[in-house]
Each structure stands twice: as C-alpha cells, then as structure tokens.
C-alpha cells in the first residue's frame, strides 16, 4: 500500500485527505502557499508541514481548478513525487492546460472526491469525510499504471468508492449535481439580504436546507463556476426555460377560465417533475405503519455533495 504522500493545499478537502492518510499510517507531508495554514493542519494531526527530503510516492494537488495545471507543472519540475493526482471539481479545462504546459501526463491521474462542506479551511477537515462517497477518477490515455495504481490506493485508504469517467462526462455531471445547485442556492439566499426581520423570523428548516450551501467560499466557487462555465450554462439554460414557463403560468393564474386552468396544469406539472427528480436521488422507502411523522425514517443527508449519475467500476486496471 501507499507509504508516503504529500498534500499540496491544506484547505478543508486537502486536510481531510491528509487526515485520512495519516489514520492509515501513511507518512504525509503538507504544503500550502500560506505556511501558517499548513501549520494549522499539522497541529490537528494531518501530517508534517514541510517538504519531503526525497520524492514521495504520490502528490495530491488540492488547489482550485484554475491552478491545477500550474501546480502540476511546478511540482513535477521540482521532482516532488513519483505520481500525481488532484481533487479539483473540474477536469476538462485543467487537463487541456496540463497538456499545453508539457506536463508529464504518464505520471498523473485526475481525481475528484464527491464530498465537501460549506465550511472551509483545515479546521473544518474530517478524516472520515470520504467514507462511502464516490471518488471520480479521470485517467487519460497517457496515464501510466503506476500513477493509476497509487491513485486507486489513495481512494481505498480514504474509504471512498472509485468511479471512472472521462473529463467531459465528469464536468457535465458535476454541473448538474453540484455546481448549478450551488449557484441557484446562492441566488435564492441573496433574496434574503434585504428581507425584513418580520419576514426572516418565519423562515424554517426548508429555507435553511435549500440555502445552506450558499455559505461556501466565494473565491473558490467563482473559480469552479468559471472553470466549468459551458456545462453550467447548459444546465442554467434549461432551468431558465422552466422558470419562464412557470412565470407565464403565474401571470395567467388569476384570469380564470381555460387560461387559468392551463396555468394550474403547468404548475402541477412543474411540481410533479420536481418530485420525480428528487426521488431519483433517494427512492422512497416502502410505507409502514411506523411512518407516522411523514418521513421514511432515514437520517437526513449531511453536508456532502450528492452522488453524481455515474457508473460503478469494479476494477480500474486497464
């Protein structure tokens, strides 16, 4: 198994990776552009806040998507590790940039753990953050067996489920299940900025659930949305069409007669499609007499991102 690693970028995700590796006995080094942040991660047991004296087996680049290619080029040039992976939530653009920069892609396999939090920084990290969660791997045709094997070991040590996707497929999936939901949550939460106190005191759990992720780091999410702009634009275009249809229905709702009936039909259809889509994430459990509180008895989801619609991969060795 993996014996040595370095995590470049000790934010919440990077530090969670380091904590998971340390818990499995992997010698883990920590590097961050802000040394104090790496030392904070070290203080909570995530590893050693210094560069290794010799190349480690695997470097995990936990930096924003726009910085992934530059980080790979820099650290390969400094011979930091034998193999490299990343945890960025966008894959297509960074891979093209890596190719243009002349990076050694035989030693690199892209990765993206589908877990996170609206909190940021090393103190928000958890060693069990990835347990049971999907971890997408996006090897290119250049990726060598050594890099792929070490990245698979990383996923295993973190307790995650490996899933194989190509770059474009991954970016379309996360635009739907992660990036657009974050933006929509932020836009909805922004409506509250000028709300009166008398309005806000009526807010319940539903509003808090739908706006929770809006608390995410602005700089990071600007980078993510900008790096996956095309795929997010496609999802938002479809959503905009649905909103336009609902707005038109609301305009006609008070007219009565056939126009009002058509408006009601449109609203019912929109709400029914929402139920159908939501049940794709968590199919309802069979009803029992014990279900007296309107729930199906399952625990509420935590702060991690939803599973993407991808296929399981029993073995990633090619």
Image (tube, grey):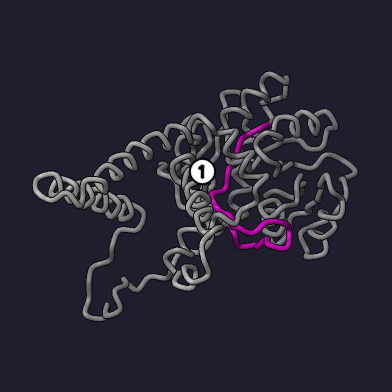
Residue 152: % across, % down: 59, 44
Residue 259: % across, % down: 14, 44
Where 277 falls versus 63 (above or below)? below
Where 194 falls versus 104 (above or below)? below
Query: SS for tag 1?
Result: helix
Residue 188: % across, % down: 47, 53
Residue at the spot 65% in from the left edge and 51% down from the top edge: 217
Other residues around mark 1 within 10 Å, as few (<14) / some (14–19) / many (≥20): many
Residue 32: % across, % down: 81, 47
Residue at the spot 54% in from the left edge and 56% down from the top edge: 213
Q: Quadrant of residue 241?
A: top left
Depth check: give the residue in front, 221 or 139: 221
Where 298 falls versus 118 (above or below)? below
Depth check: give the residue in front, 133 or 268: 268
Residue at the spot 48% in from the left edge and 65% down from the top edge: 208
Extent of the magenta region:
108-129
Residue under label 1: 179
Depth check: give the residue in front, 5 or 62: 62
Horizontal side of residue 38 vs 167, given as left or right: right
């Amino acid at each position: 198994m993996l014996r040595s690693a370095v995590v470049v970028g000790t934010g919440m995700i990077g530090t969670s990776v380091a904590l998971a590796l340390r818990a499995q006995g992997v010698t883990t080094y920590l590097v961050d552009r802000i040394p104090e942040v790496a030392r904070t991660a070290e203080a909570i047991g995530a590893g050693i806040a210094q560069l290794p004296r010799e190349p480690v087996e695997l470097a995990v680049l936990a930096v924003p998507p726009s910085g992934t290619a530059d980080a790979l080029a820099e650290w390969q040039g400094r011979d930091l590790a034998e193999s490299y992976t990343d945890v960025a939530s966008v894959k297509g653009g960074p891979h093209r940039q890596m190719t243009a920069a002349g990076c050694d892609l035989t030693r690199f396999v892209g990765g993206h753990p589908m877990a996170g939090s609206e909190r940021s920084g090393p103190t928000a990290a958890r060693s069990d953050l990835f347990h049971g969660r999907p971890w997408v791997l996006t090897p290119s045709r250049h990726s060598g067996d050594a890099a792929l094997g070490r990245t698979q070991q990383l996923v295993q040590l973190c307790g995650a489920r490996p899933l194989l996707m190509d770059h474009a497929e991954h970016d379309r999936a996360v635009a739907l299940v992660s990036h657009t939901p974050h933006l929509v949550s932020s836009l909805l939460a922004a409506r509250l900025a000028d709300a009166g106190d008398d309005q806000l005191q009526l807010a319940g759990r539903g509003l808090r659930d739908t706006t929770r992720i809006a608390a995410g780091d602005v700089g990071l999410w600007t980078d993510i949305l900008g790096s996956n702009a095309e795929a997010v634009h496609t999802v938002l275009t479809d959503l905009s069409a649905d909103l336009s249809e609902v707005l038109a229905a609301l305009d006609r709702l008070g007219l009565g007669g056939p126009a009002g009936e058509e408006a009601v039909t449109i609203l019912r259809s929109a709400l029914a499609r929402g139920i159908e889509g939501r049940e794709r994430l968590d199919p309802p459990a069979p009803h029992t007499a014990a279900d007296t509180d309107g729930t199906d008895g399952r625990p509420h989801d935590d702060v991690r991102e939803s599973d993407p619609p991808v296929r399981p991969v029993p073995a990633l060795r090619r």
